Image: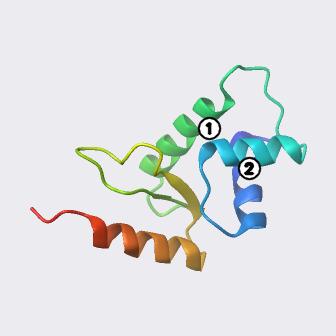
Amino acid sequence: MTFFDATLAVLEANGRPMTAREIVSQAMQRGLLTSAGKTPEATLTALLYTYVRDHPDGPLVRIAEPGAGRARRGSVRWALRESDVARQGSRSAARRQPRG
C-alpha cells in the first residue's frame, strides 16, 4: 500500500484531522505501511503538501493555525475533504487568520 492510500484509510477510519506523525503511527500499527527509512513522517508530510498543492480539489485538506508567515509549529492537521470535521476545522482556521 502506498503512503497516500494508507493516509486515506487511516483518516477515513478515524474521522478526525490528524498529524502526519499520527497517521504514520496508526498505519504502521495496522500493518498498512512499512518503512525502512528513518523519517517516514517527513516522507508523508512532503507527499501530502505536494499532493494538496497539485490537487486543490482532491480528497485531502490541510488544516492549520496561522503563524508569523507560515502555519504555527505543530498545528498542521490533515483531513478528508468531505468530512464534517474538516469543514469545521477550515472555518475555525479562517476565523483566526489576521486581517491585513
- At x 42%, y 56%, the residue is 64
- At x 42%, y 70%, the residue is 90
Q: Please tell me which of labels 1 and 2 falls first in the chain.
A: 2
Task: Using a 10 Å C-alpha cutoff, classify the residue at mark 2 as few (fewer than 14 neighbours), some (14 to 19) or many (20 or more).
Answer: few
Q: Closer to the camera: disc 1 or disc 2?
A: 1
Amino acid found under the numbered disc labelled 1: Leu
Q: Where is residue 20 in the image (x, y as percent from the top left)?
A: 61, 44
Within the image, what quadrant is residue 9 found in?
A: bottom right
- At x 48%, y 41%, the residue is 50
Q: Where is residue 80 in the image (x, y as percent from the top left)?
A: 60, 65
Give the residue at mark 1. Answer: 44
Residue 21 in view in this figure: yes
Cβ atoms under marks 1 and 2 closer than 8 Å: no
Q: Which label is found at residue 96?
A: none
Label 1: element kind: helix
Label 2: element kind: helix
Amino acid found under the numbered disc labelled 2: Asp
- Calculate the distance from the C-alpha at mark 1 to the C-alpha at mark 2: 11 Å
Q: In this view, does 86 lie to the left or right of 69?
A: right
Q: Where is residue 40 in the image (x, y as percent from the top left)?
A: 68, 30
Residue placed most toward the observer, 9 or 19: 19
Residue 59 in view in this figure: no
Q: Is residue 44 above or below residue 13?
A: above
Q: Is residue 86 left or right of residue 15?
A: left
Task: Using a 10 Å C-alpha cutoff, classify the residue at mark 1 as few (fewer than 14 neighbours), some (14 to 19) or many (20 or more).
Answer: some
For the image, the number of numbered tags is 2
Q: Is residue 99 left or right of residue 42?
A: left
Q: Is residue 73 left or right of residue 36?
A: left
